[in-house]
Amino acid sequence: MMEKMASLCKRRGFVYPSSEIYGGMQAIYDYGHYGTLLKNNIRDAWWKAMVQLRDDVVGLDSAIFMHPTTWVASGHVGGFNDPQVDCKKCKSRFRADHILEEFGINADKAPLDELNGHLDKLREEKKLKCANCGSTDLTEAKVFSLMVKSNIGSPTDELKEENVVYLRPETCGGIYLEYKNTVDSLHKKLPFGIAQVGKAFRNEIVARQFIFRTREFEQMEMQYFLYPDMMKEKYEDWKVARWSWYLEYGIKTDQIHWYKHEKLAHYASEAYDIEYNFKTLGGFKEIEGIHARGDWDLSQHSKFSGVDLSYFDQEKNEKFVPHIMETSVGLGRLVFMFLDQAYTEEAVGEETRVVLKLDKRLAPVKVAILPLSKKEELTSPAKEIWNTLKESFMCEYDETQSIGKRYRRQDEIGTPYCVTVDFETLNDQAVTVRDRDTMVQERIKIVELSKYLRDFLG
Ligand code: GAP
């Protein structure tokens, strides 16, 4: 499945390995035309639910580079690590907890000595092998920092501790630093949230997971600032809101579940993940985290910056540091989930039809306009239809190859409707509209086409 998915993504312009002509960069990908359209539609669907439809959440777009103390205060510089195991023969790198997961051992966030204890046992039992080359010559687990460094703004070329600036490992850091400006400029009262979408960078130790875990990725995060005694109620509300969002966009209830974290960060009181059952990855994997973080973030940034980030409740005449709960999801991971869910193979006669049954609102292209032949008498009215429809929908005009091949191509990119202009169109001023999922074809008058499509596409 993974090979099929990666191949479709490349062949049809969704996702390409980055810098491929130079041999590529591990765990970094580029999004092609259809991938970008799909990603933007998912982002917009998230933004609509999280900001547009709410009166208690506002938006932000903070910079990727932030003052380096941000990440000391947040604990990332000292403690944002993963346990790494290297193969001494082929130099592949693995996460120790992921190796153990393959043997059914849950070692998420386990300390190094516990991880090495499990690894030693597997070594003794001769079960520990490199997943890439099969060698048994693997190192002990050691700590590896996930922080990505840069020398932006530095007066020297050298990357020293005192001039290091980090690329943010999560977008929420920017939200905490802009909490005060948001309150001061927008006069927000608790409870309220700040949402943002943006790039994050982590030096992940990865092994063949396509766009599931990448070193450069986009996060969509919302930090909800509240009174401490509201946490329980709001946490449940947001769990319901986020769960419903997945169902609204076509994810089936039996394909997602909640995973409750038992080992919590010292400041957290609750942490749940929504996991999705990937066909491609062979099981349930984390998609989104919902975390109750207490007053840790604002207290830490207050302490390290010396700026008072407490909130003054005028009615109660009381000052306190707001507590925070967050929802956090990777945009690339959602792209992968929706592609995984949509990918369908169907027998049509002797052939296999590959079709992406994406929610119509997320589909990269909504309507393809296909003249049956390249003759001007058909291309001219087809282009006229394209010119009208493209004002309302993302459309594609295609006159190449046979109509059968063009239908297959649109199926593979998940286009909900194909509009075919044929010789009959010249007599009846009507076109054939083909539905992606049912393949049923309907004859629709050109004058009624916009309304017909709007009824289905919204
Ligand atoms: N602010 C909290 C935070 O960043 P996280 O569990 O580390 O929490 C949240 O990340 C979400 O971000 C994950 O559930 C996942 O969807 C996404 N994510 C994290 N690391 C990623 C990576 N390397 N590649 C793609 N997505 C990633």
Image (cartoon, grey):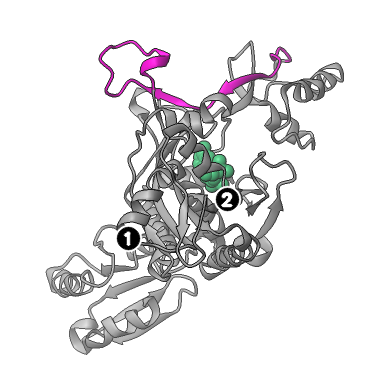
Q: Main secondary structure of the magenta part?
A: loop
The residue labelled by disc 1 is 186
Q: Is residue 12 visible?
A: no
Q: Percent x, y for residue 307?
A: 41, 39
User: Residue shown at 28%/65% (left/top)?
Assistant: 394
Using the rendered view, name the quadrant where residue 56 is placed.
bottom left
Based on the picture, tell me whether residue 2 belongs to the magenta stretch.
Answer: no
Based on the picture, tell me whether residue 141 belongs to the magenta stretch.
Answer: yes
Kindly state the secondary structure of the residue where label 2 is placed: strand
Q: Nearer the viewer, residue 65 or 329?
A: 65
User: Residue shown at 63%/11% (left/top)?
Assistant: 89
User: Residue shown at 34%/68% (left/top)?
Assistant: 366
Q: Which stretch did the figure color magenta?
A: 136-164
Using the rendered view, name the quadrant where residue 17 is placed.
top left
Q: Is residue 225 left or right of residue 186?
A: right
CA neighbours of label 1 inside 10 A, class few (<14), some (14 to 19), many (20+):
few
CA neighbours of label 2 inside 10 A, class few (<14), some (14 to 19), many (20+):
many
- For the C terminus, give its image quadrant: bottom left
Kindly state the secondary structure of the residue where label 1 is placed: helix
Q: Is residue 106 left or right of residue 332?
A: right
The residue labelled by disc 2 is 287
User: Residue shown at 25%/72% (left/top)?
Assistant: 392
Query: What is the three-letter code of the residue carrying label 2?
Result: Ile
